[in-house]
Structures are given as C-alpha cells and as structure tokens.
Amino acid sequence: MRIRALLIPICLLAGIACSPPGEAFAARSDTEVPDSAGIATLAGGCFWCIESAFDGVEGIYSAVSGYTGGDTPNPTYKQVSSGATTHVEAVQVRFDPTKIDFARILHIFWRQIDPTDAGGQFADRGAQYRPVVYYHDEDQRAIAEESKKALQALGKFDKPIVVPIVEASEFYVAEEYHQDYHLKNPDHYKRYRYGSGRTPFLQRVWGDEADAHKTEKSSGGDWSRPSDDELRARLTPLQYHVTQEDGTERPFQNEYWDNKREGIYVDIVSGEPLFSSRDKFKSGTGWPSFTRPLVSENVVEKADRKFGWNRVEVRSATGDSHLGHVFEDGPEPTGLRYCINSASLRFVPKEQLEAEGLAEFLAGFED
C-alpha cells in the first residue's frame, strides 16, 4: 500500500481528459532531446521524488515518470500502484554525455533512496516501489556494479545495499498529471515527501549532500551566500544569531510581524525571493506567518528534533539561512503556517520590485 494511492488525478477534478500512458514521452522528448542523448532508467519508490531530484541539474535534458520492469502492456497508475502488475514506478532520464555521465547520475540517485530496503521505499510498500537500477548496455552495467560497491564502502549504512542491477526493458510513460508533480503541486509534494519519511531519512543519512547536485537557481536570480566574515560585518547581531545560529527572535517585537504593505520578502543573506505579502496572514503568534512560499524551490524543509520536539525547520535554499518552522495549522488554501523570523527577511515593497530586478513578481499583485 502507499499513502498516495487515494489521490484523485488533477485532470479528472478539472473535468478534462488525462493523457493516456505513452503519449507524454513523445511530447517531451522528440523536439527537446537530441539523438545523441544518453539514457538512464531508475526506480526508487515514488517517481515524483526521483524525477524532482534531476530537475535543475546541469546536463539533464529531461526526467520522465513512468513504469517498467513488468509484462503488462500500457499499464496505468491504478494497475501499478495496486500491485496488480509486475511493473515498478520508475524515472527515465535523458542526459548530455558531454556534461554529465552515468556514474554521476547514479551518485545523485543513491542520495534519494534507502538502498537497504528491497520491500519498497519509506511509506510506500510493495514490489511496485522497490528500488532498481536498469542498465541499457554493458558499460552501464559495469558502472552500476562499481557504483553500488562504492556506496557500500562509504559506510553510511549498517545493512547491505540490496538494489538489483537489471537489464532495461520497455518503459511506459505515466499519465500526464504525474509529470513534474513537484512543480505543479509543490505544497502537497513537500508534505508527502516529508510525511512518507523520505526527507527525514535523507537528511539524517546525507545532510546537505542530498541536494548538493542542484545547480540551477530558481526564479532566474543569481543568488549566493556571502562568507561568514562578510555576514558578521553586514548583519545585525540578531540577524546573524537567527540565520546562522538557528536562533529565534521575540514575538510581537520584530520588524514584520504586523507589516501590511504589499511586496515580497527575500532572504536577508542571499536575496533569494521567499514569501509574498499576498500569502501573509495574521496568525496571532507574533511572527510573520505565510500560507506558502513564493518560490517553493527557494525554501528547504528539514527535520528538527531539538528540545525533544518533532518539528519541520525551513531554511533558504541558497543562503542556507534559518528562517523558522512550518506547521499544519494554517488557513486555506494550503492548511500550512510558515512561521518565519523577521530577522531572516528583507522586505521589498511592490513599487521597488522592478528597480531591484524582481519585476517578474509584479504580476502576483495584479487584481
């Protein structure tokens, strides 16, 4: 069983036809991927999570969710997720061999799964969620064998690596509503990923290395994290304590808790856009509270077990600033409350967005 199985396809809710399996690949690959592209096929439980791992990686043309490893022709999500076929959820990656090789793709893949679990992945149980590396030629098979040995030798796991290396078979593209799910439904995706146990596990085993392969900046900005010396010189003592030492400011005694102006909030350290005033609400807590991030890729969630509590910390992706925590007691439409320290933010009023190179966010304030 799996915790995603009860989801209703978004296209059905909207009253339109879902693309049948097999059609999405043509739309995604024929005009976008050159004939010289390499191909890798990987299964690691939820294909949303494996697909998202390759989003923004230099040298990756596409990552497509689908089904492989079974005998049923043109399988559907309902068939595969129920365990009625011998297929697994998988992702097929097309890549530029001059920029990234198969070994590097496996390096990324190992850091997205529990390679010691052959019975599924995290909350998703059953053979349809088993992890598998599929090879497309003998070179890939040899590389995969060596990569698997190297992973075991790292000593990150106290159990054997059990991921089989299997010859690739026919790959069937999943329904369109599954493609780029992490971009279409970022809030639900992040809740699922954390709630399934994947995010806490990867953070515990790999820490920041789980996402170290990401190279593309979201929202078109050239954000960067200054040196510690520069931060100490530029930030106030409170801003440094909050962002660099995971501190917390006083409620009701901070700059933005009651700010009602229109604009966006950026990371005080890197400048990357984080939240919009359109998603800000009065929570009564004394800290700025938002229902969702402005750019979901700029906000990273991590397990926080300090003080004996099980909380979800939020940090900025590039600046790695401690921002606050996210709770599931917010209003609609997300039901979330991003409780953020003012000291980790800088407010950019709507009328200054264009001057600061953030004109792309002006559309969010049009009635």
Image (cartoon, helix red, strand yellow):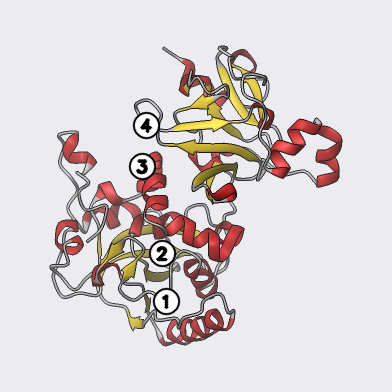
Tell me which label, 3 or 4, sits earlier in the chain.
3
Question: Of the residues shown, which amino acid type is indicated by label 4?
Answer: Gly
**Above or below 60: residue 331:** above
Q: Is residue 122 left or right of residue 38?
A: left
Q: Secondary structure at mark 4?
A: loop
Distance from the alpha carbon under mark 1 to that under mark 4: 34 Å
Q: Which residue is rendered at x = 35% and y = 47% of the image?
A: 181
Rendering quarter of residue 164:
bottom left
Q: Is residue 176 left or right of residue 151?
A: left
Quadrant of image for the N terminus: bottom left
At label 1, counting other C-alpha atoms closer than 10 Å, the crowd grade (few under 14, some 14-19, many 20 or more) is some
Q: Which mark is on residue 188?
A: 3
Q: Which mark is on residue 335?
A: 4
Residue extending farthest to the front is 308
Q: Which residue is rendered at x = 59% and y = 49% of the image?
A: 306
Question: Of the residues shown, which amino acid type is indicated by label 2?
Answer: Val
Say which residue label 1 marks.
Answer: 116
Q: Secondary structure at mark 1?
A: loop
Distance from the alpha carbon under mark 1 to that under mark 2: 23 Å
Rendering quarter of residue 355:
top right
Q: Can you give x and y, in whole percent of width and height, for residue 223 in the image?
A: 67, 40
Tell me which label, 1 or 2, sits earlier in the chain.
2
Question: Of the residues shown, which amino acid type is indicated by label 1?
Answer: Thr
In the image, which is nearer the foreground, mark 3 or mark 2? 3
Q: Is residue 54 visible?
A: no
In the image, which is nearer the foreground, mark 3 or mark 1? 1
Q: Secondary structure at mark 3?
A: helix
Q: Is residue 15 left or right of residue 149?
A: left
Q: Can you give x and y, in whole percent of width and height, for residue 31 in the image?
A: 37, 53
